Amino acid sequence: MPTENASQTFRSFSEKVGRFKLKGKTFLIPQMNRIGGHLLAGTFRSFGIHALVMDTYKGLDLGKAFTSGKECFPCQVTTGDILFFMQKEKDRLGPAFDARNYIYFMPEAEGPCRFGMYNKHQRIVLDSSPGLQNLKIGSLTSKNSYSLEGMLDQEQTRNFRKAGYFSVVVADVLDRLLWRIRPYEKEQGMADEFVEKAMAIMEKAFEAYGATLDFERILDRLEEVIEEGKYLIDPTLPRKPLIGVVGEIYLRTHVQSNQDVIRMIEKYGGEVVNASIAEWVNYTTYDRKREARIGLRLSLKELRVKKIKEHLISMLSYGIDLFYQQMRQNQVYKRVRAHLDLEEDHRLEKLDKALQEEDLYSFDVGTEACLSISGILEYMAHGYNGAVNVYPFTCMPSTITSSIVKPVLNRMKVPYLDTPYDGSYQPGREASIRTFMFQAQQHFKEHGRGAGSRK
């Protein structure tokens, strides 16, 4: 009997987790980055896919009921999100409810990070939940840089990847617009209200123009938003200490899970720049290109002609993808920076080089640690006044980051703060952030900002 159950479980993984046709289904996108999720949903709708962003954090009790606490915290949050949403759908539709009409989006990554197991765990949970056994999980993987092949019609796949990536970059810009305005807003609450409206405007723009790749019209809308938003800034207010945030991609981005850490830093006098979502997408493409280059080098040594050709094609393909992605990033930031001084994104080649120069870590090891460590080095090179590492409690890549960058920033005399989260409210959390910001204020008084401090 146990063997039979195990066989059913593995069959469920192969048959109900993967890339499935989205046409005619409701595609459920979990909230990680609120703006990014909505712009991505608008892009899917532009291609004829009924996509929507689920409410988040309302089903956390459900998520905790179906997890042991040993899982990464985002697994608990997203498990609760999908169970809460499907329960609402059951209540709304009654006997007409059919789980086969939905596909739940939960990508994965390779390597030691527990993120790669979320959709497997959630598959088991869904299979044990009445009425949800037929809910499929649509999963993309970092192994092929999140290819969408098999989910959309073949002729749509390439164009969607371009439009989807563009939505990620624009979402990053809207986040950075919020963080640029809010510490200096003329009236409290203006920035949040404005960016919420801006998100709706850009979501409609992607729904209208995403499928035709009419990026100029999308950028025209974005420029209008930036131009209007900059007038919410009170020009009489002096600039504040600049704080760089890194860490695990979900926690640093999901406001509820990190207990709105950016707003807390702002409360005590900081201006924040968080690592972007586009940086991670670029990283997966860059890493596939690196792997192909390494494979090509080994194949050349062994004179394996077939493998040489395969690796060469792969290296060129991912190289073209990365070039395109960075070209689109440059295009967006050039347009918006003509109106407002938003911080630009890191370049992967520069992050890789920074780690090699400092001999602290290596892209060969992988995980988000290579982005977080090098990202902090770049923040320091551009004169930031402090760094914050946001991550789930017990996260391995972020623990590695902390162990490496703490002594480095201590040597530089730059404030550093770890902020792990597991859903509990720690009594000393605000005091820690307040102390960190006092140190950042002292660094700001002594060094200013933007001068560069990396030795």
Image (tube, rainbow, N blue to C red):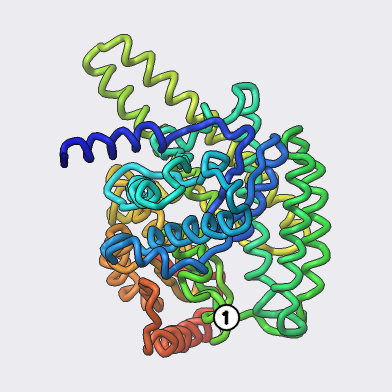
Residue 217: name its quadrant: top right
Quadrant where the C terminus lies?
Answer: bottom left
State the image quarter where residue 133 is shown.
top left
Percent of width and height locating residue 154: 60, 22
Residue occupying the point 42% across, 38% down: 141
Residue named by callout 1: 266
Using residue 59 as the reference point, say whether residue 34 is left or right of it: right
Q: Residue at x 62, y 49 (%)?
A: 169
Q: In the figure, is residue 396 to the left or right of 127?
A: left
Task: Classify mark 1: helix, strand or loop.
Answer: helix
* Structural crowding at the residue carrying mark 1, measured as other residues with C-alpha within 10 Å and reported as few (<14), some (14–19) or many (≥20): some
- Residue, x 58% and y 41% (percent of image)? 326
Q: Is residue 12 left or right of residue 450?
A: left
- Where's residue 378, x and y in %? 46, 60
Q: Position of residue 291 (x, y in %)?
A: 35, 32
From the viewer's side, name the closer residue of 142 and 87. Answer: 87
- Tell me if residue 455 can be seen: no
Which residue is located at x 42 percent, y 70 percent? 61
What amino acid is at disc 1?
Glu
Determine if residue 407 is in view. yes
The reply, left or right, for residue 78 in relation to residue 112 is: right
